[in-house]
Image (cartoon, helix red, strand yellow):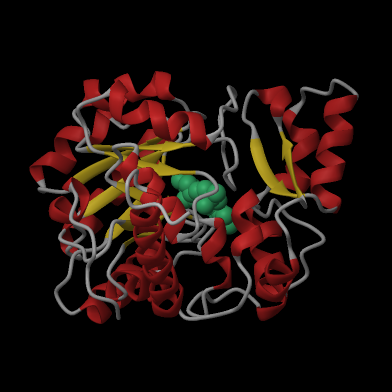
Amino acid sequence: MRDPIFRTEITRMLDIRHPILCGGLGPGVSDGAYVAAVVNAGGMGFVVSSGYDAPDEFERQLAICRERVGGRGFGVNLYISRQAGGIERVTDLLPLLKRHGVTCVETAGASPEPIVPVLKGMDIRILHKVPAIRYVATAERVGADAVIVVGQECGGHPGVYMIGSMVQAAQAPRATALPTIVAGGFATGRQLVSALAMGNAAMLMGSRMMVAEELWIDRKIKDFAVRSDGSEGMVVKKIFRDNHRVLGNDSARAVLALEAEGNTDFDSYRPHVVGGVTREAYRSGDPSTGMIDWGQAMGFADRVASVESIFDEIIDDASAAMAHLGTVQAGKAVA
Ligand SMILES: Cc1cc2nc3c(=O)[nH]c(=O)nc-3n(C[C@H](O)[C@H](O)[C@H](O)COP(=O)(O)O)c2cc1C
């Protein structure tokens, strides 16, 4: 494991070695074993709360993570659906977080406002994830401890404005006094250095981590990710203003066809978008069906490796980038 080379508001707040976060991966993908590997590699990860048939299974993942991190803090991803019952579903899970020593949450999907007092009462840090700078104000207003700003390159939900990470990463630190974490296409140490140089306190990754050895998903999905150059993704569900960047497979194409017809009956989409189909793809290793979140950073996922090895590569790359900056400083540049 590499020595720390950066200290930021986020490494201090979360007591982590590197300013590298790995976002929640649903449904049920970022489980206890994977998140523990991220934490033990010096970053922060989030056990995803969606994708389990019963709260018991989610609780089991928290217990596995807690046991493996040896007293270190770890996080939970709370995706708050904007459909009826969304906030109630995550509210019901909150007592489990306290019981299993969760220290931070990554909230996403909708405003976490109704659960903020409970989380604060449990001394859990709130990192609210938003897809556009305009929502940073929501994170501030509700009392989040930090804000994660995701650009349109991301796997998952890029939001409806679809502004790129290079723009938003430069805007985020100027838009708020909260520590900012940037995501969407981030996967290398060079990008980490650029994010910090712009004034951000960390980067967060999703797609690049799909090749982590510790993830339970079938090896064939990881090998497919290794072969991917990031161009296989497409954005679906625009018709519902629920933009979703996924792998362009049979399910994604069926959804696009329904959208092209102007169909707004969600029931027609259900067979293609339900979590069960996606989980089965991860289990079987057949990526032809399911909503498989697929970001442009998949192009950086060039080998199946342990989380620690991926982190080492990122830190080495960041060190090289810092050294490179020294060579281009005025007065020091080599002709
Ligand atoms: C396979 C996969 C599943 C994801 N599932 C979720 C999820 O359940 N909840 C969530 O908030 N974000 C989810 N995300 C988004 C990530 O947490 C993260 O914000 C995003 O991947 C960052 O952009 P990147 O893909 O360019 O690294 C998912 C991303 C991927 C690749």
Q: Is residue 279 left or right of residue 215?
A: right
Q: Which residue is at a point 72% across and 77% down the rendered structure image? A: 220
Picture layout, residue 3 above or below residue 233: below
Q: Which residue is at a point 54% across and 76% down the rendered structure image? A: 216
Q: Is residue 259 left or right of residue 153?
A: right
Query: Can residue 111 be seen in this snapshot?
Result: no
Taking the view exactly as shown, the residue that stands out farthest to the front is: 335
Task: Please provide percent x and percent y for residue 105.
Answer: 28, 49
Residue 114 falls in which quadrant of the image? top left
Task: Please provide percent x and percent y for residue 164.
Answer: 56, 32
Query: Can residue 104 be seen in this snapshot?
Result: yes
Q: Nearer the viewer, residue 328 or 78?
A: 328
Task: Please provide percent x and percent y for residue 54.
Answer: 44, 61
Task: Please provide percent x and percent y for residue 42.
Answer: 27, 70
**Tag count in the figure?**
0
Q: Nearer the viewer, residue 304 or 106?
A: 304
Quadrant occupied by the N terminus: bottom left
Picture layout, residue 110 above or below residue 99: above
